[in-house]
Image (cartoon, rainbow, N blue to C red):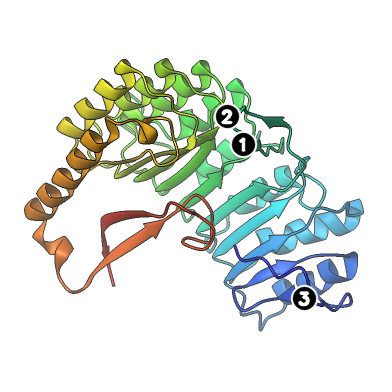
C-alpha cells in the first residue's frame, strides 16, 4: 500500500483517493462521501484501500459497514485501521453481510497502532483484537472470497479452532465447508495455535498460499507446519518470513525433508534466523533445484502465457517489502 508523502497537501473536505486506490479517511465527511460512492448505481470502485483510525458514531459506522458488505462492485477491500479494530467497521455485521456477497474476492485487515512489544532487535509488533466470532459462519456460506489476510489479528485459541474447522476436510464425509479460499494469512502466537492451524493443513485441499505472522515461534510449532503439509499436494507457498523462526537442527532437517517430498512447495524464510545461517545456502540450492524440477514436470507453466506472481507480506505486492517472493504458479493470462 502506497503512502502519500508527508508534505502532500490534502483537501480535508473530500477523501484523498490516489491512483493506487488508497483512500485516506480523515474525518466523517470522508466516510459519508465514500458511502455515497459505494452505494451509487454508477460506482466503479473494484479495489479499495482504506486507512483510518478515528472513532465513528455508531449510526455512521453501521452505514459504512453495510456499504462495504453490500457493494456489488467491490472485489478487493484492504483495511488498515486502529488497534482496537472496531472504530470504523462493525466486523460482526460485516461477516453476516458477506455471507451472501458474491463479488468480494479479497479481504485484507491490518493494524496501524503504537507498538505493543519489541524484541531485542527492535522489531515492532502491531496487533488488533477485532472480533472474528462470526467469520467461520461467513466462510461456510460465502462461495466467492478467495483471499483472506488477517496478519495483525490476535485470534484466541477457540476462534482459531472454529476457523480451522471450516477449512478442514471432514474425515467421515470427505467434505470441506469452505472450498473457495486459496490465500490465507494468520497471526500465530503459541505452540497450541500453531498445532491447530497445522492440523487444518493436513486435510485442506484448497489453500495454495499460507502466510504465518507473529512475534513468537519455537521449533515445535515450525516443525508442526512442515510435518502437516507432507501429504498436501495443493499448497504452493508456505511463508514464514513474518514469523520469528529460529534456526535449530530440528527445524533445518524438517525444512529439507519437506522440500524433498514436496518439490512444488516454496518455503519463504527471508528475514528469519534460518536465512542468516551459513547453512541457508543448502536450503536455497534445494529450492532452486525444485523449481527446475517442477517446471520440467509441468511444461505448460513455462509457456509464453504463463504468469509469475510476485508476492509479499502486504497488499501492495512489491511496494513495501524488502523481500519479494517469486513463485511460479499455474496462473494463465
Q: Where is 145 relative to 240, above or below?
A: below
**Residue nearest the viewer, comparing 83 with 179:** 83
Q: Residue at x 26, y 56 (%)?
A: 329
Compared across the picture, whether 105 is left or right of 68 comes to left
Q: Where is 326 relative to 49, above or below?
A: above
- Toward the front, the furthest residue is 278
Q: Residue at x 50, y 42 (%)?
A: 185
How many other residues sit within 10 Å of disc 1, few (<14), some (14-19) or many (≥20)? few
Compared across the picture, whether 169 is left or right of 112 comes to left
Q: Earlier in the sequence, mark 2 or mark 3?
A: 3
- Residue 288 circle label: none
Q: Residue at x 86, y 54 (%)?
A: 54
- CA gap between label 1 and label 2 equals 9 Å
How many other residues sit within 10 Å of disc 2, few (<14), some (14-19) or many (≥20)? some
- CA gap between label 2 and label 3 equals 34 Å
How many other residues sit within 10 Å of disc 3, few (<14), some (14-19) or many (≥20)? few
Residue 227 screen position, x and y as percent: 29, 22
What residue does disc 2 label?
Answer: 215
- Residue 8 circle label: 3
Contact flag, marks 1 and 2 (Cβ < 8 Å): yes
Amino acid at each position: 500500500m502506497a503512502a502519500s508523502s508527508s508534505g502532500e497537501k490534502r483537501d480535508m473536505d473530500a477523501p484523498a483517493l490516489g491512483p493506487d486506490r488508497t483512500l485516506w479517511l480523515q474525518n466523517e465527511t470522508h466516510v459519508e462521501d465514500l458511502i455515497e460512492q459505494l452505494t451509487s448505481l454508477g460506482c466503479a470502485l473494484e479495489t479499495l484501500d482504506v486507512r483510518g483510525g478515528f472513532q465513528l458514531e455508531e449510526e455512521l459506522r453501521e452505514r459504512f459497514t453495510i456499504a462495504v458488505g453490500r457493494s456489488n462492485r467491490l472485489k478487493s477491500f484492504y483495511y488498515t485501521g486502529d488497534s482496537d479494530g472496531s472504530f470504523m467497521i462493525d466486523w460482526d455485521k460485516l461477516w453476516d453481510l458477506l455471507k451472501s456477497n458474491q463479488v468480494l474476492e479479497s479481504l485484507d485487515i491490518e493494524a496501524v497502532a503504537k507498538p505493543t512489544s519489541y524484541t531485542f532487535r527492535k522489531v515492532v509488533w502491531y496487533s488488533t483484537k477485532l472480533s472474528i466470532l462470526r467469520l467461520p459462519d461467513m466462510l461456510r456460506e460465502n462461495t466467492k472470497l478467495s483471499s483472506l489476510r488477517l496478519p495483525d489479528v490476535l485470534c484466541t485459541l477457540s476462534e482459531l479452532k472454529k476457523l480451522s474447522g471450516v477449512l478442514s476436510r471432514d474425515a467421515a464425509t470427505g467434505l470441506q465447508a469452505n472450498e473457495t479460499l486459496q490465500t490465507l494469512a494468520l497471526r500465530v502466537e503459541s505452540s497450541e495455535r500453531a498445532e491447530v492451524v497445522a492440523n487444518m493443513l493436513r486435510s485442506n485441499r484448497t489453500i495454495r498460499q499460507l502466510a504465518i505472522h507473529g512475534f513468537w515461534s519455537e521449533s515445535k510449532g515450525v516443525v508442526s507446519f512442515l510435518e502437516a503439509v507432507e501429504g498436501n499436494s495443493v499448497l504452493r507457498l508456505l511463508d514464514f518470513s513474518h514469523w520469528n523462526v529460529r534456526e535449530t537442527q530440528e527445524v533445518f532437517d524438517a525444512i529439507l525433508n519437506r522440500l524433498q517430498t514436496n518439490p512444488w512447495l516454496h518455503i519463504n524464510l527471508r528475514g528469519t534466523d534460518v536465512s542468516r545461517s551459513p547453512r541457508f545456502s543448502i536450503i536455497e540450492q534445494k529450492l532452486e533445484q525444485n523449481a527446475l524440477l517442477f517446471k520440467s514436470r509441468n511444461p505448460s507453466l513455462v509457456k509464453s502465457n504463463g504468469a509469475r506472481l510476485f508476492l509479499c507480506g502486504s497488499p501492495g505486492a512489491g511496494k513495501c517489502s524488502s523481500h519479494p517472493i517469486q513463485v511460479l504458479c499455474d496462473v494463465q493470462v
